[in-house]
Amino acid sequence: MELKTMDSGAAVKLAEGAFGAPFNEALVHQAVTAYLAGARSGTKAQKSRSDVRGGGAKPWRQKGTGRARAGTIRSPLWRGGGVTFAARPRDHRQKLNKKMYRGAMRAILSELARTERLVVVESFTVDAPKTRELAARLRELGLPSVLVVVEEVNRELGLAARNLVGVDAVEPHELNPVNLLTREKVLITVGALRKIEEWLA
């Protein structure tokens, strides 16, 4: 497969190993689910009856009072008691081996190239860390919501992109299934393209 660079019009040949894979919806779905699950904090915590302070003594004797049996004032049925099925901190990560992850990335990148959502340029830089300047450049290219992939995100590009809604600037090793799929277009330099091919081909 070949793509033409938007700035110079030169033809760039894409490696079949990285950009010629069929789209595997089940694998991509699994990769996206695993990535989002890994991003969950899992820090939710509540106290059960054994964690709540107090309640060591039996409130009244077992029989003869006419009241229902009670062993602790920290029962979940009582005000101030614990939570019946208390939440605990947990790890939401799902196992996805490297071969499957790379396969999902190949499928996504190949589909982006086939559907013309992958825009290749020779290079992409900004002269100053100005959001307005970057926004103007992207408007010229017709890319309002875009993921910019460059070999190295320098200070100027990083500062210019961080305040733009719908725009992210990343390096090849920062690519993931979610940031590739949630942008209308992916703007990528030839140098970054070659790095991805080294990784996936």
Image (cartoon, rainbow, N blue to C red):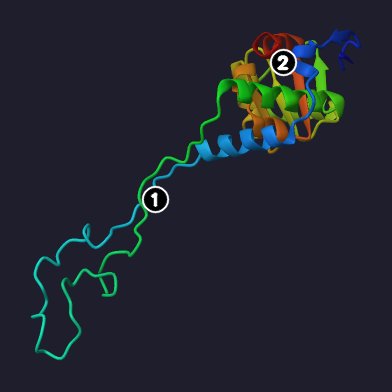
Q: Which amino acid type is marked by label 2?
A: Thr
Q: Which residue is mark 2?
A: 125
**Does the CB distance between marks 2 and 1 fall below 8 Å?**
no
Residue at the image position 72 percent from the left and 22 percent from the top: 106
**Residue 31 location, x and y as percent?**
62, 33
- Closer to us: 162 or 32: 32
Q: Quadrant of residue 72?
A: bottom left
Whether residue 129 is visible to the viewer of this picture, yes or no, is no
Q: Which mark, by number, is residue 67?
A: none
Query: Residue sitting at 81 percent across and 15 percent down?
Result: 121
Residue 65 left/right relative to 180? left
Q: Residues within 10 Å of mark 2 (few under 14, many from 20)?
A: few
- Residue depicted at 51% across the width and 31% down the height: 95
Q: Secondary structure at mark 2?
A: loop
Quarter of the image with the N terminus in it: top right
Q: Quarter-wise, where is residue 141 in the image?
A: top right
